[in-house]
Image (cartoon, helix red, strand yellow):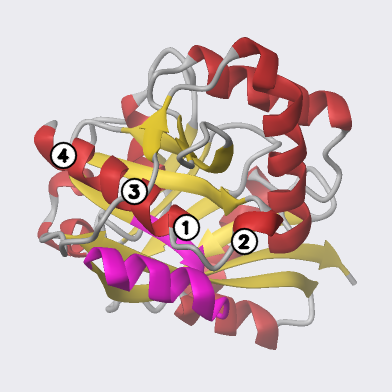
Amino acid sequence: MFKKIGRNDAIFKSELFLRDVIAFNVMISILDDINKYPSPKIFSNGSNCVVVNSDSEHPVLVWTADQFTDFESLTQLIQQEFYKNNPLKIISKFIFFEFIKTENKFSVVDIETLGVYECCKLNNIEYVGFPDNIKTEEVLLVAELLALFGTETGTDKNATTEKYIDLAQEFVTSSLNKAWRNKQGKIVALTKLKVSEDYVRAGHVITTPEERGKSYAKMLVHYMTNHAMHLGKKPVLYTDYNYSASNKCYMAVGYEYLCTIANYELENI
């Protein structure tokens, strides 16, 4: 039986959950950030399943241990507690994704396969250019790059220009977000970091179209990963598992593939 639990529940320290904690680092980020996510909905069966959602705009995060089998009860919980909007976004292991596909209650759309990576040891690479903060006058350029990232990855399909400008403003105001500049000082790549108690997760890694093929993204990810390690945190990445260019970039830096998870949407039939 599923029950509401708190963000400090013992299950988050259990051996089963800790085996998958890197793949579900987004869940930990929500639980750790009380100011940004003051009242997430958290449910668990007390042993091998946790469901977390911060708000209606973000995906429902579903962790199941490999031993979990009661997918019928899990589906009922999601229908009762989370299915308020159509479509419903979910991130889960493939085992639950495969179960959902066999059900006749939903249509599964916008499927994305995410590769999960961690870095324990950096490879040596040569830098060309340098990392830097983003200047206020570069907000519109950053917004254009973020919009391009959304288009190329298929994320933020309903995002407006205003939303990308707001996101670009966050890049300017946070020291966690960096650009890579070429020798002439031009922005050629950028990334955004999210920091939890134990992990640093890089996202929105993108290179300007005219500068691709020059390893600028690899240099930026390498620099940010090294910075994370000096903070005493474990660097992790989520990437489109089917996008070979980004996967090669991360492995060249020193990241190792851990597993894949499914990011998808459900619609009523």
Would you call the spot at circle 1 few (<14 residues within 10 Å), some (14-19), or many (20 or more)? Answer: many
- Quadrant in the rendering for residue 248: bottom left
- Which labelled disc corresponds to residue 267? none
Inspect this view and state whether residue 45 appears.
no
- Residue at which label 3 appears: 25
Q: CA distance from mark 1 to mark 3?
A: 12 Å
Q: CA distance from mark 1 to mark 4?
A: 24 Å
Q: CA distance from mark 1 to mark 2?
A: 13 Å
Between label 3 and label 2, give the one nearer the viewer: 3
253 part of magenta stretch: yes
Residue type for callout 1: Val
- Residue at which label 1 appears: 62
Residue type for callout 3: Asn
Helix, strand or loop at mark 1: strand
Measured from the top left, where is residue 44 in percent x and y? 37, 49
Between label 3 and label 4, give the one nearer the viewer: 4
* Label 2–label 4 contact, CB within 8 A: no
Say above or below: 22 vs 269. above
Between label 1 and label 4, give the one nearer the viewer: 4
- Residue at which label 2 appears: 76
Between label 2 and label 4, give the one nearer the viewer: 4
Q: Point out the stretch of residues depicted in magenta.
A: 237-254
Would you call the spot at circle 2 few (<14 residues within 10 Å), some (14-19), or many (20 or more)? Answer: few
> Mark 3 or mark 2, which has the lower sequence index?
3
